[in-house]
Amino acid sequence: MTVFGRRSVLAGTAGALALPWVANAQANRLSISIWGGSWRDMVANIVAKKFTADTGAQVEFITGGTIDRLNKAKLAKGSPETDLTFTTSHVGWLYATDDLFETLDLTKVPRAAKLVDQAKISPFHIGTWAYVYTIGFRPDLVRNITFESWADLWKPEMRGRLAAPDFDPSHIIVVSAMLEGGDAATWEKGQARLRALKPNFKAFYTNDANSQQLIASGETPVQVILSMNAHFIASQGVNLRLVIPKEGAVLGIDTVAIMKGSRRQELAYRFIDTLLDPGVQAAIAADKKGSPTVSDATLDPAIAALPGVFTSAEQWRTQAIIIDHKLRAEKTAEWRRWFQENIIAG
């Protein structure tokens, strides 16, 4: 229960006099579910700060892991703890199929007219920023291999040099299928190829910090890596190069949605519109080194030049491998189980 809620229960007759004030305070406050750490800080400092300046409404954040927050939302179905939720595009589909998101009325979000097509995820959630998983390598430690194609990861000289995430194998699973003429829906086509990659794996990282440690130390000089994390590592002085293979890089999009049952939907729509402001989008791109999801954001040329930062329709079309977001939501558990049994432990 909130502080305001406790006051209305405990203050008796005096509290009744304060109820209009309490109601107004609650109406002028937006609650947002998001990851913690730098993600929460980025949204607070760039988006919420402008939103509060424009509307006078305060923003509070409820933080947690991706799946933990989904499970909490399921338990609170019909009476959500928060008004807005940030999550990944495919996990957003898990919310939507459980009827936890409102259908968005984008006429209330004028700036949504500038959304790139790839950010129009569903009738319930839209993209906020984008990134890729692609090949990152240490050119000072890997001098005899070029990475023009994902197939280069299978070269014999890659033996014992590669790391990939253990928490989401969808990237390498879909790439393996593509190299065998398949796709996410026919991912089984890549199983034999992926098994052939096992000797080249040195480690599987559990989070961004673990990824940073493995590549900075040189233990795994090549990784299937989050572009935002790679750019951060490079900014810390590590000689790291990020490449976009000829087949493209696997796109990831984080999203925002309004929780079904939110009593502050008008404020929620205002927040989403603020989030899509081109200046806000440019600031997010500068902070996280990711792609804006609106077409009218003007990025610093140094940011726009980074691999995995898309600023044109041509880049979105030719450099992004898009796994159908709903299919990915449906297949993630199966893919993780298969990868654990056949690649990590097999």
Image (tube, helix red, strand yellow):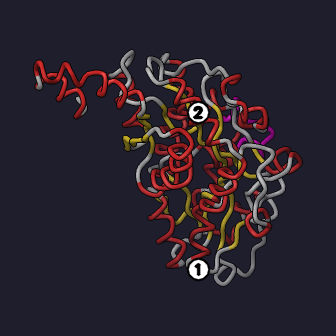
User: Does the magenta portion include 181?
Assistant: yes
Q: Amino acid at mark 2?
A: Arg
Residue 118: quarter of image: top right
Q: In the rendered image, which residue does mark 1 sit on?
A: 238
Place of residue 24 in the rendered image (x, y in percent of width and height, measured from the top left)? 37, 27
Label 1, label 2: how far apart the Cα atoms are = 40 Å
In percent of the image, x 19 and y 19: which residue is there? 16
Residue at the image position 58 percent from the left and 29 percent from the top:
269
- Residue 35, numbered circle: none
Q: Residues within 10 Å of mark 1 (few under 14, many from 20)?
A: some
Q: Secondary structure at mark 1?
A: loop
- Is residue 175 something one can see in this rendering? no
What residue range appears in magenta? 175-187
Work out whether residue 231 or residue 250 is closer to the camera in this orientation and state it.
Answer: 231
Of residues 334 and 89, the one nearer the viewer is 89
Question: x and y percent of residue 49 in the render?
Answer: 51, 50
Of the 4 image quadrants, the one containing the N terminus is: top left
Extreme residue toward the bottom, this view = 140
Residue 320 lies left or right of residue 11; in this view the side is right
Residue 270, compared with residue 234, is above or below; it is above
Going 40% across and 30% down the picture, which residue do you hit?
Answer: 82
Which residue matches tag 2?
270
- Magenta span dominant secondary structure: helix
